[in-house]
């Protein structure tokens, strides 16, 4: 979806338009076609930023419970403003990883590209506004430290947008992963963040645990003629 199409869709759909005009948060409309028809009861949104993905989930599934994780203070504050008054949406200000504690987040100029991994040369080359601006100490948790089986009843989706930290985040979700029906994860074909697992490793990790790759969507090219990252939807077999 190109940027003009996305802007027009944000302005056309009332729920998206309201969030954009009130808080300047543009819903991630490229996910609409992927989420539609999954019949979700719960969405766990890891790497929520300002609630761009959660807005899509809420429009498509008005009764679903949305549990977002966002470690950065600024975006987390905006998320809370966007979903103020939504009793079925909540935010936990933390990153999900293999260990609980504190870590340094590499905060990008465009903070949606921030990561617990150092921002690599390829990321800065393909997406020039994503060089490191500063660092911020954030809380890290394992998913099972904040959620239990009761919160994941019904058809649950686990969404990850964690900028190269996908494999560590999945390992931090390992205890609860069998309770999800879907996993939706962004992964990269080239190293954008130093030391990250590439898409092949992320796919292999989930396939080996009984997941089926159902869809590859939203390829991103940067300056390349070939896709350098994409979104992967997995379904529990």
Image: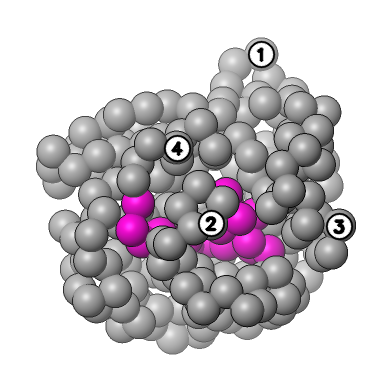
In contact (CB < 8 Å): disc 4 and disc 1: no
Instruction: Give the CA separation, mark 3 to mark 4.
Output: 24 Å
x and y percent of residue 124 in the render? 75, 43
Mark in the foreground, 1 or 3 = 3
Q: Report the residue at 78% width, 57% height from top.
A: 18
Q: Is residue 47 magenta?
A: yes
Left or right of 112? Residue 155 is: left
Q: Which residue is mark 3?
A: 21
Above-or-below relation of 72 to 30: below
Secondary structure beneath disc 1? Answer: loop
Q: Which residue is mark 1?
A: 225
For the record, the magenta segment spans 40-56
Q: Earlier in the sequence, mark 3 or mark 2?
A: 3
Secondary structure beneath disc 3? Answer: helix
Residue 36 bears which disc, if any? 4
Q: Residue furthest top?
A: 225
Instruction: Give the CA separation, mark 3 to mark 2.
Output: 17 Å
x and y percent of residue 169 in the render? 38, 61
x and y percent of residue 149 in the render? 20, 73
Q: Report the residue at 82% width, 28% height from top.
A: 4
Instruction: Give the CA separation, mark 4 to mark 2.
Output: 11 Å
Instruction: Give the CA separation, mark 1 to mark 3.
Output: 35 Å
Left or right of 33? Residue 39 is: left
Q: To which quarter of the image does residue 75 belong?
A: bottom right
Secondary structure beneath disc 4? Answer: loop
Residue 14 visible in rendering: yes
Mark in the foreground, 2 or 1 = 2
Q: Residues within 10 Å of mark 2 (few under 14, many from 20)?
A: some
């Amino acid at each position: 979806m190109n940027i003009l199409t996305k802007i027009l869709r944000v302005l056309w759909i009332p729920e998206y338009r309201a969030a954009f005009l009130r808080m300047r948060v543009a819903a991630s409309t490229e996910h609409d076609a992927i989420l539609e028809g999954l019949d979700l009861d719960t969405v766990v949104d890891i790497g929520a930023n300002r609630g761009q993905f959660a807005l899509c989930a809420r429009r498509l599934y008005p009764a679903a419970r949305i549990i977002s994780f966002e470690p950065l203070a600024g975006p987390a504050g905006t998320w809370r403003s966007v979903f103020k008054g939504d009793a079925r949406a909540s935010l936990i200000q933390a990153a999900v990883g293999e260990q609980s504690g504190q870590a340094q987040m590499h905060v990008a100029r465009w903070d949606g590209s921030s990561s617990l991994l150092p921002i690599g040369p390829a990321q800065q080359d393909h997406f020039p506004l994503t060089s490191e601006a500063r660092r911020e100490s954030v809380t890290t948790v394992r998913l099972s430290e904040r959620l239990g089986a009761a919160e994941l009843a019904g058809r649950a989706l686990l969404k990850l947008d964690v900028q190269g930290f996908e494999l560590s985040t999945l390992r931090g979700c390992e205890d609860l992963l069998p309770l999800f029906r879907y996993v939706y994860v962004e992964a990269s074909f080239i190293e954008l963040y130093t030391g990250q697992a590439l898409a092949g490793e992320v796919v292999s990790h989930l396939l080996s645990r009984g997941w089926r790759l159902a869809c590859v969507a939203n390829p991103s090219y940067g300056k390349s003629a070939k896709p350098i990252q994409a979104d992967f939807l997995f379904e529990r077999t």
